[in-house]
Amino acid sequence: MNMKQMIVAAAAGVVCGAMALDLNGTWEFRFDEGRAVTAVAGPAFEPTGRMVVPGCFDAMPETFMKRGTAMYRRTFTLEKGVDNAWLVIDGMGLYGKFWVDGRAIGIDDLPYSRVELATGPLAAGAHTLVAAVDNRFDWSYQKLAQSFYDFHFWGGFYHGVSLVFDNRKLFVRTRDYKTGTVEIEAVNFQNRDFDATLVFDGKSEVKATFKNGRATVKVPNFKLWSPDAPNLHTVSLGGSRSRATVADAQERVPPHADAQERVPPHADAQERVPPHADAQERVPPVVARFGIRTIEARNGGFYLNGARIFLKGANRHDQQMQLGASTPEGFMLTDIQNLKRMGGNFFRGAHYPQAQRFLDLCDEMGVLVWEESLGWGNGQRYTQSGKQNDLVDPGFVAKQLEQTKLMVRNSFNHPSVIIFAFLNECDSTKPECKTLVDQLIETIREEDSGRLVSFACNRTRGDLCHANTDFVAFNTYPGTINGYPGTHDELKQKIHDMEGYGVDWLAKYLGERYPGKTLFISEMGGAGQYGSRDPSCPVDTEDFQAEHNALVAEAAWGNPAIAGIAFWQFFDTRTCGRECLNNGKKHQATSWAGQFSADRKPKLAVGVLTDWFTNHVPANLR
């Protein structure tokens, strides 16, 4: 396979135009049910079949819903040697070990995240890449995924694997949206102080002086990014002798790895040059795509580029029922088009870092996104089952901080991402939870990415953790999970005023607890099985879901304190089955709360929400 020029924006979100090898396709494969990845001593194995990348092996007929360790192998060829390269895993689950030519290069224990592993020197010729991927739940080494999380964890490579030869990146920060002033940060360059010529949109040159890796300039002929006008710009930095380094691409080795697995650091790491550069050759440019926009939460509302907006949309899992978490781009685009056709403007990415290609499409089509690191119900009484509280587990805390920081850096240049979050429905009444939440808030803010910071809270009474967030987000299910629906009038009363759960009750309570903060409904909705129709609106029919969500919309649109809502959820998904919450009672291992079916057929609720999204002005905007 020859090296070829390809756009890496889909894989990186922040870098395009770099040299890369696409490693997707058919790999040699072996699956050992029940086997732990820690039992894999090395890369040698006898294949028993084939597996596609990207793809989820536990969605395939021969290994359907099985848990264990899968071995993958493929070869690739370099036309000439390189001093270093980076293996890019664009989301996987749940834990992986990687070897090149029999040499361990590191691990990936951050499910769903885009992770880069430095390979070290690679000679010209053929090379063999091997991966061991474990989709089991084992808290001794996989510290982010638990079997009780209320969604299905898939095994495999979600959105592909590639090899890149330049890890330089540009991070773009909007400093003044009125004048088009941005700050460019050059990451992984050999020099921190240098003069350069920036090229915007492939044509407009701007001289820049970088100090400590940063330069502030005005974008020529700039246009703002928004859902109605998703204008994107590019910036190119090249023509200098700035060299790529591995400064921010540390080897990822599990804490239990023995001496034979550890990868020694390269002595001359700071001097590594992209493979295509030599003494007579200029280093190729680094290109970033970005949008100019600002987001604020103030005066009880959200403001995009200074204009007040109402967030209206739904929660979305990255899933296609038959293919698992390896969602094809066609389904991503379908979801975005469906949301836009409904008049919506917002997706909450539940409950893990989002695929970079999906965020690319949201950038291009004008969809606002909430992105969060992996977590669900951590520290709650109903999830502990006698086990140690996750919130005080040092390994869990460390991985939360690591994945959250990586999420911010991976998605830095996506204007669609306006919110970074974490720890969905953690027990926010506990002091140890506030300690971790405050650490995560600081981790995000240290990156200075221009996003709002929050988390979705379902322990609203007694919540401690929204003290330092930018706005208050809450999940609530009056008349469904919280209580029973009763008659139409009883359901309406509960959705508005049920103590502890009703929209109006929570708006008043949280407004008094956190005066002046913007309020957002991060989850609310009801289930309805596609095709189940009954005019008496029994629970779990399309009719009930439509009735319920109409009442929810009426409450959200009618309360001036509510600045937006993400309905649960956009389409039906596979969730945890017999292992869920240790009780095995999840009906058909499926959440029927989608406005669309799993294969994206609209339910009655779609028409209801389309009417509210397009024909009604929220009180928050009046």
Image (cartoon, grey):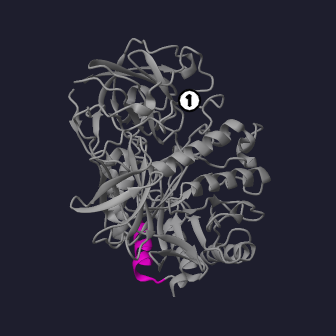
**553 or 577, nearer to the observer:** 553
Depicted 465 relative to depicted 343: above or below: above
Residue 456 occupies which quadrant of the picture?
A: bottom right
Depicted 4 relative to depicted 373: above or below: above
Residue 572 visible somewhere in the drawing: yes
Residue at image coords 36%, 30%: 85
Q: Residue 503: horizontal and vertical position, in percent?
A: 64, 74
Residue identifier under label 1: 136
Q: Residue 460: horizontal and vertical position, in percent?
A: 71, 64
**5 or 515, nearer to the observer:** 5
Residue 290 occupies which quadrant of the picture?
A: bottom left
Does 391 sit left or right of 567 as displayed?
right
* Residue 613 on the magenta span: yes
As helix, strand or loop, the secondary structure at mark 1 comes to loop
Q: Residue 124: horizontal and vertical position, in percent?
A: 26, 20
* Residue 167 on the magenta span: no
Which residues fall within the magenta stretch? 604-617
Crowd band around label 1 with a 10 angstrom C-alpha radius: few (<14), some (14–19), many (20+)? many
Depicted 603 relative to depicted 430: above or below: below
Residue lying furthest bottom: 622
